[in-house]
Amino acid sequence: MIGVGRAKHNLNVVDSPLGKGKSEVSLSAFAFLFSELVQYNQGKVENIAELEEAGFGVGIQILELLCHREKANRRETRVLGILSFVHSTVADSLEKGTEHEDEYMISEKELLVNKFVSVPASMGGFNCGTFVAGIVKGVLDGAGFPASVTAHFVAVEGQTRSRTTILVKFAEEVVQRDAPLA
C-alpha cells in the first residue's frame, strides 16, 4: 500500500502556517488604492466621514495582526502605554493636551495619505488624515480605550504645507480607570 503510515504533504491553505511575506508595499500601489478609496468617498457616498469608518476597520485588523505577531500575550492597560504603541507606528510626536486632561495630540509633519493628495478649493479643509484618525480610533477601541479621534490641519510658520494633528479625546470611563494607576 502506498502512503500507509505517511503524513500528508498536501496541506490545506487554512492549515498551513502564516508566511512572513513581504513586509513592504509599493508606494505607488498604496497611493493608487488610497486614491480610489478617496474618490469613492467623494463621489458615491453622502458623507465623507465614511473615510474615517474605513480607517476604523483597518485599525481593528492592524491591532489583531500586531498582537498575533508579537506573541507576547500582553495587553496594554494604561493610556500612555497604548498611546506610545500608536505613536511608534503612526507619527512624529505625541503631546498631552494643555486644556483638557483627557486629550492627547499625535502630530505628523507629512502623513503618507496626504503626501500625494491635492485638495480642490471646493472641498475646503478636507483632510485625508481622517483615514489615519479612523485607524487610530480602531486600534484604541479594539484595545479597550474608547476615544473620539479627529484629524486637523495645523499651520506651521515658514512652511507651505500644514502639519496634520490627530486629536485623541478619551472617554470618561478610560480617564477614571487610568487615574488610580497613575
Image (cartoon, rainbow, N blue to C red):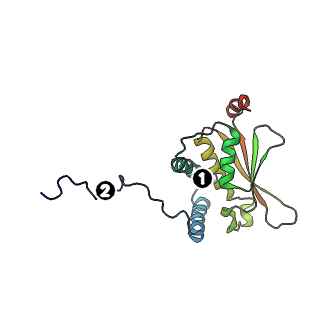
- Using the image, tell me which numbered label, if any, was put on residue 55: 1
- Identify whether 8 is placed above or below 84: below
Q: Residues within 10 Å of mark 2 (few under 14, many from 20)?
A: few
**Residue 149 image position (x, y, % from top left):** 69, 46
Question: In the rendered structure, are the residues bearing label 2 and label 1 in contact, judged by CB atoms less than 8 Å apart?
Answer: no
Q: Position of residue 170 (x, y in %)?
A: 70, 39
- Pointer 1 local density, CA inside 10 Å: few below 14, some 14–19, many at least 20: many
For the residues marked 2 and 1, what is the alpha-carbon distance in whole angstroms?
Answer: 34 Å
Q: Residue at x 57, y 53 (%)?
A: 54
Q: Residue at x 57, y 59 (%)?
A: 44
Q: Is residue 71 above or below residue 124?
A: above
Q: Secondary structure at mark 1?
A: helix
Residue type, label 2: Leu
Q: Secondary structure at mark 2?
A: loop
Residue 89 occupies quadrant: bottom right
Q: Is residue 130 visible?
A: no
Residue at x 62% of width, y 39% of height: 76
Amino acid type, callout 1: Gly
Residue located beneath label 2 in the image: 11
Q: Position of residue 57 (x, y in %)?
A: 55, 50
Please, is residue 79 above or below residue 151 in the view?
above
Which numbered mark, 2 or 1, is in the foreground of this view? Answer: 2
Q: Nearer the viewer, residue 120 or 132?
A: 132
